[in-house]
Image (cartoon, grey):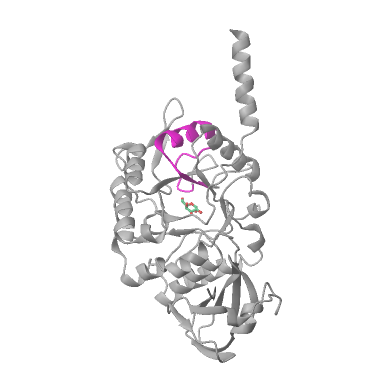
Protein backbone atom coordinates (compact mmCIF):
# COMPACT_ATOMS: atom_id res chain seq x y z
CA UNK A 1 0.00 0.00 0.00
CA UNK A 2 2.73 2.39 1.09
CA UNK A 3 4.80 1.58 -2.02
CA UNK A 4 1.80 2.25 -4.26
CA UNK A 5 1.18 5.56 -2.53
CA UNK A 6 4.82 6.56 -2.97
CA UNK A 7 4.69 5.72 -6.69
CA UNK A 8 1.52 7.79 -7.12
CA UNK A 9 3.09 10.70 -5.25
CA UNK A 10 6.25 10.49 -7.35
CA UNK A 11 4.12 10.49 -10.51
CA UNK A 12 2.23 13.57 -9.34
CA UNK A 13 5.49 15.29 -8.37
CA UNK A 14 7.11 14.57 -11.72
CA UNK A 15 4.00 15.77 -13.56
CA UNK A 16 4.07 19.01 -11.61
CA UNK A 17 7.78 19.45 -12.24
CA UNK A 18 7.04 19.40 -15.95
CA UNK A 19 4.18 21.85 -15.71
CA UNK A 20 4.29 24.43 -18.45
CA UNK A 21 1.92 26.84 -20.06
CA UNK A 22 -0.58 25.42 -22.51
CA UNK A 23 0.98 25.87 -25.90
CA UNK A 24 -0.96 26.25 -29.16
CA UNK A 25 -3.33 28.74 -27.49
CA UNK A 26 -3.58 32.40 -28.50
CA UNK A 27 -1.64 31.91 -31.73
CA UNK A 28 -3.13 35.25 -32.74
CA UNK A 29 -4.01 37.98 -30.22
CA UNK A 30 -7.13 36.94 -28.24
CA UNK A 31 -10.36 38.74 -29.16
CA UNK A 32 -13.41 39.08 -26.97
CA UNK A 33 -15.28 41.25 -24.50
CA UNK A 34 -14.57 42.04 -20.84
CA UNK A 35 -17.02 43.53 -18.33
CA UNK A 36 -14.69 45.90 -16.44
CA UNK A 37 -14.36 49.08 -18.53
CA UNK A 38 -18.11 49.65 -18.80
CA UNK A 39 -19.71 47.79 -15.89
CA UNK A 40 -16.97 47.51 -13.21
CA UNK A 41 -18.53 45.62 -10.25
CA UNK A 42 -22.06 45.79 -11.63
CA UNK A 43 -21.92 42.31 -13.17
CA UNK A 44 -24.59 39.60 -13.13
CA UNK A 45 -25.66 36.45 -14.90
CA UNK A 46 -28.26 38.36 -16.92
CA UNK A 47 -25.73 40.97 -18.01
CA UNK A 48 -23.12 38.44 -19.10
CA UNK A 49 -25.65 36.28 -20.95
CA UNK A 50 -26.99 39.40 -22.65
CA UNK A 51 -23.48 40.32 -23.77
CA UNK A 52 -22.96 36.83 -25.21
CA UNK A 53 -26.26 37.19 -27.12
CA UNK A 54 -25.23 40.63 -28.36
CA UNK A 55 -21.82 39.39 -29.40
CA UNK A 56 -23.56 37.03 -31.77
CA UNK A 57 -26.42 39.29 -32.97
CA UNK A 58 -24.23 42.37 -33.51
CA UNK A 59 -21.84 40.56 -35.86
CA UNK A 60 -18.96 40.76 -33.35
CA UNK A 61 -18.68 36.97 -33.25
CA UNK A 62 -18.52 36.79 -37.05
CA UNK A 63 -15.82 39.47 -36.97
CA UNK A 64 -13.70 37.19 -34.75
CA UNK A 65 -14.56 38.12 -31.16
CA UNK A 66 -14.64 34.95 -29.13
CA UNK A 67 -14.06 35.26 -25.36
CA UNK A 68 -16.73 36.60 -22.99
CA UNK A 69 -14.86 37.51 -19.80
CA UNK A 70 -16.34 38.39 -16.39
CA UNK A 71 -13.88 40.64 -14.62
CA UNK A 72 -13.84 41.38 -10.87
CA UNK A 73 -16.76 41.03 -8.42
CA UNK A 74 -18.33 37.65 -9.24
CA UNK A 75 -16.87 36.19 -6.01
CA UNK A 76 -17.81 36.95 -2.38
CA UNK A 77 -15.88 34.64 -0.03
CA UNK A 78 -14.51 31.18 0.67
CA UNK A 79 -16.24 28.29 2.43
CA UNK A 80 -14.77 26.21 5.25
CA UNK A 81 -12.84 24.13 2.71
CA UNK A 82 -11.40 27.19 1.05
CA UNK A 83 -13.57 26.84 -2.05
CA UNK A 84 -14.41 30.14 -3.69
CA UNK A 85 -18.01 31.27 -3.14
CA UNK A 86 -19.85 32.83 -6.06
CA UNK A 87 -22.19 35.81 -5.46
CA UNK A 88 -25.49 33.89 -5.53
CA UNK A 89 -27.61 37.02 -5.76
CA UNK A 90 -25.96 38.06 -8.99
CA UNK A 91 -25.12 34.63 -10.36
CA UNK A 92 -28.01 32.48 -9.07
CA UNK A 93 -27.20 29.44 -11.22
CA UNK A 94 -23.45 29.48 -10.58
CA UNK A 95 -20.59 29.92 -12.99
CA UNK A 96 -20.77 26.59 -14.83
CA UNK A 97 -24.30 27.41 -15.97
CA UNK A 98 -23.02 30.66 -17.45
CA UNK A 99 -20.05 28.95 -19.10
CA UNK A 100 -22.36 26.34 -20.64
CA UNK A 101 -24.61 29.09 -21.99
CA UNK A 102 -21.68 30.95 -23.53
CA UNK A 103 -20.35 27.73 -25.05
CA UNK A 104 -23.79 26.99 -26.49
CA UNK A 105 -23.43 30.23 -28.49
CA UNK A 106 -20.17 29.00 -30.00
CA UNK A 107 -18.18 31.40 -27.78
CA UNK A 108 -15.57 30.91 -25.08
CA UNK A 109 -15.74 31.87 -21.43
CA UNK A 110 -13.26 33.81 -19.31
CA UNK A 111 -13.03 34.74 -15.66
CA UNK A 112 -10.92 36.97 -13.39
CA UNK A 113 -8.95 36.50 -10.19
CA UNK A 114 -5.88 37.94 -8.56
CA UNK A 115 -2.46 36.69 -7.42
CA UNK A 116 -2.80 38.51 -4.09
CA UNK A 117 -4.88 37.86 -1.00
CA UNK A 118 -7.69 40.05 -2.33
CA UNK A 119 -8.66 41.28 -5.78
CA UNK A 120 -8.44 44.96 -6.66
CA UNK A 121 -12.11 45.35 -5.69
CA UNK A 122 -11.47 43.65 -2.31
CA UNK A 123 -12.92 40.24 -3.19
CA UNK A 124 -11.10 37.01 -2.23
CA UNK A 125 -7.90 36.56 -4.25
CA UNK A 126 -6.13 33.40 -5.31
CA UNK A 127 -3.14 33.49 -2.91
CA UNK A 128 -2.75 30.08 -1.26
CA UNK A 129 -5.69 28.63 -3.23
CA UNK A 130 -4.12 28.43 -6.68
CA UNK A 131 -4.53 24.69 -7.29
CA UNK A 132 -7.97 24.59 -5.73
CA UNK A 133 -9.20 27.54 -7.83
CA UNK A 134 -7.63 26.14 -11.00
CA UNK A 135 -9.58 22.91 -10.43
CA UNK A 136 -12.80 24.92 -10.00
CA UNK A 137 -12.15 26.89 -13.18
CA UNK A 138 -11.45 23.69 -15.13
CA UNK A 139 -14.62 22.02 -13.80
CA UNK A 140 -16.73 25.07 -14.72
CA UNK A 141 -15.44 25.15 -18.29
CA UNK A 142 -13.33 28.30 -18.08
CA UNK A 143 -11.27 28.99 -21.24
CA UNK A 144 -9.47 32.20 -20.22
CA UNK A 145 -8.19 33.54 -16.91
CA UNK A 146 -7.20 37.15 -16.27
CA UNK A 147 -4.99 37.20 -13.16
CA UNK A 148 -4.48 40.54 -11.44
CA UNK A 149 -1.78 41.91 -9.12
CA UNK A 150 -3.48 43.77 -6.22
CA UNK A 151 -2.72 43.03 -2.55
CA UNK A 152 0.42 41.05 -3.32
CA UNK A 153 2.63 42.84 -0.71
CA UNK A 154 6.05 41.18 -0.95
CA UNK A 155 5.17 38.48 -3.49
CA UNK A 156 7.52 37.95 -6.41
CA UNK A 157 5.60 38.37 -9.63
CA UNK A 158 7.41 35.79 -11.69
CA UNK A 159 7.03 33.02 -9.12
CA UNK A 160 3.43 33.95 -8.30
CA UNK A 161 2.36 33.80 -11.93
CA UNK A 162 4.42 30.67 -12.57
CA UNK A 163 2.66 29.01 -9.64
CA UNK A 164 -0.75 29.80 -11.13
CA UNK A 165 0.40 28.66 -14.55
CA UNK A 166 1.42 25.32 -13.04
CA UNK A 167 -1.91 25.06 -11.20
CA UNK A 168 -3.82 25.62 -14.44
CA UNK A 169 -1.68 23.10 -16.28
CA UNK A 170 -2.16 20.52 -13.55
CA UNK A 171 -5.94 21.05 -13.59
CA UNK A 172 -5.72 19.94 -17.21
CA UNK A 173 -8.14 22.21 -19.09
CA UNK A 174 -6.45 24.42 -21.69
CA UNK A 175 -6.93 27.98 -20.42
CA UNK A 176 -5.48 31.16 -21.92
CA UNK A 177 -3.53 32.80 -19.10
CA UNK A 178 -3.71 36.60 -19.09
CA UNK A 179 -1.16 38.19 -16.77
CA UNK A 180 -2.37 41.51 -15.38
CA UNK A 181 0.68 42.78 -13.50
CA UNK A 182 0.65 46.26 -15.13
CA UNK A 183 4.24 46.06 -16.38
CA UNK A 184 6.03 46.78 -13.07
CA UNK A 185 8.42 43.83 -13.28
CA UNK A 186 8.72 43.98 -17.10
CA UNK A 187 6.77 40.76 -17.72
CA UNK A 188 7.73 40.92 -21.42
CA UNK A 189 11.19 39.85 -20.23
CA UNK A 190 10.07 36.80 -18.25
CA UNK A 191 6.49 35.85 -19.09
CA UNK A 192 6.84 34.27 -22.52
CA UNK A 193 6.72 30.78 -21.01
CA UNK A 194 4.32 31.72 -18.23
CA UNK A 195 1.33 33.42 -19.84
CA UNK A 196 -0.19 34.03 -23.26
CA UNK A 197 -0.46 37.80 -22.78
CA UNK A 198 0.67 40.31 -20.22
CA UNK A 199 -0.47 43.81 -19.42
CA UNK A 200 2.29 46.33 -20.10
CA UNK A 201 0.84 49.33 -18.22
CA UNK A 202 -1.62 50.49 -15.59
CA UNK A 203 -5.30 50.76 -16.42
CA UNK A 204 -6.53 52.48 -19.56
CA UNK A 205 -8.98 55.38 -19.13
CA UNK A 206 -11.60 56.48 -21.64
CA UNK A 207 -9.64 59.61 -22.57
CA UNK A 208 -7.39 60.54 -25.50
CA UNK A 209 -4.36 61.45 -23.36
CA UNK A 210 -4.55 58.21 -21.35
CA UNK A 211 -4.98 56.06 -24.45
CA UNK A 212 -2.16 57.71 -26.41
CA UNK A 213 0.05 57.55 -23.30
CA UNK A 214 -0.35 53.77 -23.38
CA UNK A 215 0.64 53.70 -27.06
CA UNK A 216 3.87 55.54 -26.14
CA UNK A 217 4.75 52.83 -23.63
CA UNK A 218 4.58 50.07 -26.28
CA UNK A 219 7.33 51.56 -28.44
CA UNK A 220 10.20 49.36 -27.39
CA UNK A 221 8.19 46.20 -26.87
CA UNK A 222 7.60 44.95 -30.41
CA UNK A 223 10.34 42.33 -30.23
CA UNK A 224 8.69 40.59 -27.29
CA UNK A 225 5.38 39.80 -29.03
CA UNK A 226 4.58 36.83 -31.24
CA UNK A 227 2.24 33.87 -31.63
CA UNK A 228 1.23 32.62 -28.17
CA UNK A 229 2.79 35.54 -26.24
CA UNK A 230 1.46 39.07 -26.60
CA UNK A 231 1.98 42.49 -25.09
CA UNK A 232 -1.37 43.66 -23.74
CA UNK A 233 -1.90 47.44 -23.71
CA UNK A 234 -5.26 46.86 -21.92
CA UNK A 235 -8.85 46.51 -23.02
CA UNK A 236 -10.62 48.72 -25.52
CA UNK A 237 -12.61 51.80 -24.58
CA UNK A 238 -14.19 52.12 -28.05
CA UNK A 239 -17.86 53.13 -27.62
CA UNK A 240 -17.70 54.15 -23.96
CA UNK A 241 -18.25 57.85 -24.64
CA UNK A 242 -15.09 59.59 -23.42
CA UNK A 243 -13.46 60.03 -26.85
CA UNK A 244 -14.68 61.16 -30.27
CA UNK A 245 -15.28 58.59 -33.00
CA UNK A 246 -12.13 59.85 -34.74
CA UNK A 247 -10.18 59.15 -31.54
CA UNK A 248 -11.76 55.72 -31.17
CA UNK A 249 -10.73 54.92 -34.76
CA UNK A 250 -7.19 55.89 -33.80
CA UNK A 251 -7.38 53.80 -30.60
CA UNK A 252 -8.61 50.74 -32.52
CA UNK A 253 -6.12 51.23 -35.36
CA UNK A 254 -3.16 51.49 -33.00
CA UNK A 255 -4.25 48.37 -31.10
CA UNK A 256 -4.50 46.46 -34.40
CA UNK A 257 -1.12 47.77 -35.55
CA UNK A 258 0.38 46.67 -32.22
CA UNK A 259 -1.00 43.10 -32.51
CA UNK A 260 -2.81 43.80 -29.25
CA UNK A 261 -5.45 41.55 -27.75
CA UNK A 262 -8.81 43.05 -28.80
CA UNK A 263 -11.05 42.94 -25.75
CA UNK A 264 -14.05 45.18 -26.35
CA UNK A 265 -15.06 46.99 -23.16
CA UNK A 266 -18.35 48.63 -24.13
CA UNK A 267 -22.03 47.71 -23.85
CA UNK A 268 -22.44 45.39 -26.82
CA UNK A 269 -26.22 45.33 -26.46
CA UNK A 270 -26.51 49.10 -26.94
CA UNK A 271 -23.84 50.27 -29.33
CA UNK A 272 -24.05 52.87 -32.06
CA UNK A 273 -23.51 51.99 -35.71
CA UNK A 274 -20.22 53.95 -35.63
CA UNK A 275 -18.97 51.92 -32.66
CA UNK A 276 -19.94 48.67 -34.36
CA UNK A 277 -18.26 49.73 -37.58
CA UNK A 278 -15.03 50.48 -35.74
CA UNK A 279 -15.00 47.26 -33.74
CA UNK A 280 -15.86 45.08 -36.73
CA UNK A 281 -13.61 46.67 -39.35
CA UNK A 282 -12.51 43.45 -40.99
CA UNK A 283 -9.43 44.87 -42.72
CA UNK A 284 -8.05 46.21 -39.44
CA UNK A 285 -8.87 42.99 -37.63
CA UNK A 286 -6.99 41.11 -40.36
CA UNK A 287 -3.92 43.25 -39.60
CA UNK A 288 -4.26 42.57 -35.86
CA UNK A 289 -4.69 38.85 -36.47
CA UNK A 290 -1.96 38.46 -39.09
CA UNK A 291 -0.39 35.03 -38.50
CA UNK A 292 3.22 36.21 -38.24
CA UNK A 293 2.27 38.26 -35.17
CA UNK A 294 4.71 41.12 -35.80
CA UNK A 295 3.86 44.06 -33.52
CA UNK A 296 4.28 47.47 -35.18
CA UNK A 297 7.19 49.80 -34.43
CA UNK A 298 7.37 53.54 -34.73
CA UNK A 299 9.31 54.19 -37.96
CA UNK A 300 9.33 57.93 -37.69
CA UNK A 301 8.66 60.36 -34.86
CA UNK A 302 8.11 63.97 -35.85
CA UNK A 303 6.70 64.97 -32.47
CA UNK A 304 3.00 65.24 -33.06
CA UNK A 305 3.15 63.20 -36.29
CA UNK A 306 4.31 59.58 -36.31
CA UNK A 307 4.55 56.72 -38.77
CA UNK A 308 4.13 53.17 -37.49
CA UNK A 309 4.63 50.03 -39.56
CA UNK A 310 4.53 46.28 -39.34
CA UNK A 311 5.34 43.39 -41.61
CA UNK A 312 2.52 41.02 -42.50
CA UNK A 313 2.63 37.54 -43.97
CA UNK A 314 3.46 37.07 -47.66
CA UNK A 315 5.80 40.13 -47.71
CA UNK A 316 2.84 42.44 -47.17
CA UNK A 317 2.87 45.40 -44.90
CA UNK A 318 0.64 47.75 -42.88
CA UNK A 319 1.54 51.38 -42.24
CA UNK A 320 -0.26 53.79 -39.96
CA UNK A 321 0.14 57.58 -40.09
CA UNK A 322 -0.78 59.14 -36.76
CA UNK A 323 -1.66 62.79 -36.26
CA UNK A 324 -1.40 63.25 -32.49
CA UNK A 325 -1.82 67.02 -32.60
CA UNK A 326 -4.94 69.03 -31.83
CA UNK A 327 -4.74 70.60 -35.31
CA UNK A 328 -5.53 69.32 -38.78
CA UNK A 329 -2.35 68.38 -40.62
CA UNK A 330 -1.52 68.04 -44.26
CA UNK A 331 1.14 65.37 -44.70
CA UNK A 332 3.19 64.07 -47.60
CA UNK A 333 2.76 60.38 -48.32
CA UNK A 334 5.41 58.64 -50.38
CA UNK A 335 4.26 55.05 -50.88
CA UNK A 336 7.60 53.88 -52.30
CA UNK A 337 9.49 54.88 -49.19
CA UNK A 338 6.71 53.65 -46.87
CA UNK A 339 6.95 50.24 -48.52
CA UNK A 340 10.73 50.14 -48.27
CA UNK A 341 11.02 51.28 -44.67
CA UNK A 342 11.54 48.89 -41.80
CA UNK A 343 12.06 49.62 -38.10
CA UNK A 344 13.74 53.01 -38.10
CA UNK A 345 15.70 52.44 -41.30
CA UNK A 346 14.65 53.87 -44.60
CA UNK A 347 15.00 51.80 -47.77
CA UNK A 348 15.77 48.46 -46.23
CA UNK A 349 13.03 46.31 -47.78
CA UNK A 350 13.78 45.31 -51.38
CA UNK A 351 10.14 45.59 -52.46
CA UNK A 352 8.76 47.38 -55.51
CA UNK A 353 5.60 49.38 -55.42
CA UNK A 354 4.52 47.96 -58.82
CA UNK A 355 4.04 44.58 -57.16
CA UNK A 356 1.48 45.93 -54.71
CA UNK A 357 -2.00 47.37 -54.50
CA UNK A 358 -2.36 49.89 -51.69
CA UNK A 359 -5.58 49.83 -49.66
CA UNK A 360 -6.82 52.68 -47.53
CA UNK A 361 -8.12 50.50 -44.72
CA UNK A 362 -10.66 52.96 -43.26
CA UNK A 363 -11.96 54.10 -46.64
CA UNK A 364 -11.97 50.42 -47.68
CA UNK A 365 -10.76 51.32 -51.14
CA UNK A 366 -7.68 51.17 -53.29
CA UNK A 367 -5.37 54.19 -53.45
CA UNK A 368 -3.88 55.34 -56.75
CA UNK A 369 -0.10 55.25 -56.45
CA UNK A 370 0.89 56.59 -59.87
CA UNK A 371 2.09 59.87 -58.37
CA UNK A 372 5.10 59.20 -56.19
CA UNK A 373 4.00 61.61 -53.47
CA UNK A 374 0.46 62.51 -52.47
CA UNK A 375 -0.75 65.02 -49.92
CA UNK A 376 -3.22 63.84 -47.32
CA UNK A 377 -5.28 65.96 -44.92
CA UNK A 378 -5.53 64.46 -41.47
CA UNK A 379 -8.00 65.73 -38.83
CA UNK A 380 -6.71 66.17 -35.25
CA UNK A 381 -6.08 62.88 -33.38
CA UNK A 382 -6.64 60.82 -36.53
CA UNK A 383 -4.92 58.04 -38.43
CA UNK A 384 -4.51 56.84 -41.98
CA UNK A 385 -3.92 53.12 -42.27
CA UNK A 386 -2.57 51.66 -45.50
CA UNK A 387 -2.09 48.02 -46.39
CA UNK A 388 0.32 46.99 -49.11
CA UNK A 389 -1.36 44.01 -50.71
CA UNK A 390 0.65 41.78 -53.04
CA UNK A 391 -0.77 41.75 -56.57
CA UNK A 392 -1.88 38.24 -57.51
C1 LIG B 1 -7.21 46.20 -11.94
C2 LIG B 1 -7.05 45.75 -13.39
C3 LIG B 1 -8.31 46.13 -14.15
C4 LIG B 1 -9.52 45.48 -13.53
C5 LIG B 1 -9.63 45.84 -12.05
C6 LIG B 1 -10.68 45.02 -11.33
O1 LIG B 1 -7.25 47.58 -11.83
O2 LIG B 1 -5.91 46.31 -13.95
O3 LIG B 1 -8.19 45.76 -15.51
O4 LIG B 1 -9.43 44.08 -13.69
O5 LIG B 1 -8.39 45.63 -11.37
O6 LIG B 1 -10.77 45.30 -9.96
Q: Is residue 137 magenta?
A: yes
| Residue 323 at x, y percent in the picture | 54, 81
| Residue 199 at x, y percent in the picture | 56, 55
Is 8 on the left-hand or right-hand side of 262? right
Magenta residues span: 120-147
Image point (61%, 30%), residue name: 16
Residue 83 vertical position relative to residue 301 in the rendered view, above or below: above
Image point (40%, 66%), residue name: 279
Image quadrant containing the N terminus: top right
- Near-viewer residue (54 or 236): 54
Q: Image quarter for residue 226?
A: bottom right
- Near-viewer residue (75 or 335): 335
The answer, for residue 190, to whether it is visible in the render is: yes
Q: Is residue 143 magenta?
A: yes
| Residue 92 at x, y percent in the picture | 29, 38
Image point (60%, 74%), residue name: 308
Residue 319 vertical position relative to residue 77 in the rendered view, above or below: below
The answer, for residue 328, to whether it is visible in the render is: no
- Near-viewer residue (164 or 72): 164
| Residue 56 at x, y percent in the picture | 32, 56
Q: Image quarter for residue 63?
A: bottom left
Image point (36%, 39%), residue name: 95
Residue furthest out toward the front: 392
Is 317 on the left-hand or right-hand side of 45? right
Amino acid sequence: MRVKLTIVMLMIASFCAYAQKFDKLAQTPPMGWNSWNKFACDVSEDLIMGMADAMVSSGMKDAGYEYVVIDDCWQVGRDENGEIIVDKERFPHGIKYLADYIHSKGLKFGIYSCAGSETCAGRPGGLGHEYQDARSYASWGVDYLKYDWCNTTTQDSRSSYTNMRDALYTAGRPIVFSICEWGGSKPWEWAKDVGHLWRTTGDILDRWDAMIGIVDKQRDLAKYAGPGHWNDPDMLEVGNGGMTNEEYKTHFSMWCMMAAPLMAGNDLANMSEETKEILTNNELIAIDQDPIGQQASCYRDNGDYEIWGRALENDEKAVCLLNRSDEEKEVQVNFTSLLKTSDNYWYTYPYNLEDYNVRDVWEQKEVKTDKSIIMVKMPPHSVKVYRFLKKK
